[in-house]
Amino acid sequence: MNRRPWLVAGLAGLTLTACGFKLRSSQVFAFERIAVTPEGGGNLVPELVRYLGERVVPLVPPTAPNAPQVIFDIVQESREKTVVGVNASGQVREFQLRIRVKFRLRNPQGNELIPLTEIEQHRDVSFSEAAALAKEAEEVLLYRDMQADIVQQLLRRLAAVKRLD
C-alpha cells in the first residue's frame, strides 16, 4: 500500500491550518430580524431577500412583536450602459455596463449603523452587429453577475455590523 499520497495530503492540511486558512462559512449577523426597503422595488432586493431568508420581516412599528431590529434602505439602484469605444466609421465597438447601489443600515430609532454608502460594479463588453443577439444575452449575464457580486458585498457589510445601537 502506498502511503505517499496520504502523507502529502496530511502535510498540505497541516500547512493550510498553520497559515490561518479557513473555509468560508455562512455569515453571522448581529440581528435576527431585518426590514428591507424598498420592499418590492429594484432588481437587487429579491436576491438579497433570498440570501437573508427568514430574517426578513415587514417594516412595522417598533412596538410590534415581530418588529425589525434593523432597517436596510436601498436609497438608489441604477443600471447604466455607456459607449466607451467606436471604430473609424462611428460604429459602436465597446460598451461599459454599470450598476450603482446606494444604501444605508439603521435601527428603528433612526441611528445609522452603516451610513449612506455607494457600491458600484462595472464591466466592459465588446459589441458586434453580426452577433447582436448573442451580445444581448451576454449583457444579461454580466448584469446578473454584477448583481450577485453586489449582494455578496452587501452581506459582508451587514455581517461586519456588531452593535445595533
Image (cartoon, rainbow, N blue to C red):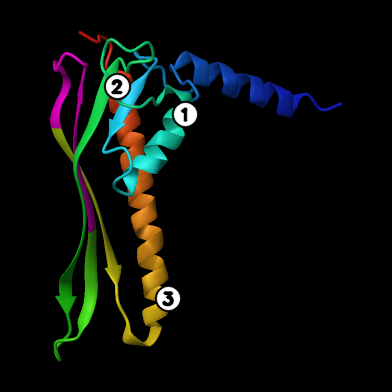
Label 2 is placed on what type of residue? Val
Q: Which residue carries the number 3 mark?
A: 134
> Where does the image place residue 123, in percent across and percent down from the top left?
27, 58
Which of the 4 image quadrants contains residue 61?
top left
Which of the 4 image quadrants contains residue 50?
top left
Mark 3 or mark 1, whichever is nearer to me? 1
Q: Which residues are magenta?
A: 98-116
Residue at horizontal 40 percent and vertical 35 percent from the top: 49
Circle on res. 60: 2
Which of the 4 image quadrants contains residue 37?
top left
Q: Nearer the viewer, residue 87 or 39?
A: 39
Label 3 is placed on what type of residue? Ala
First-in-chain label (1 vs 2):
1
Mark 1 or mark 2, whichever is nearer to me? 2
Circle on res. 53: 1
First-in-chain label (3 vs 2):
2
Whole-angstrom CA distance, mark 3 to mark 2, is 45 Å
The image shows residue 101, relative to residue 125, as above or below, that is above
Circle on res. 41: none
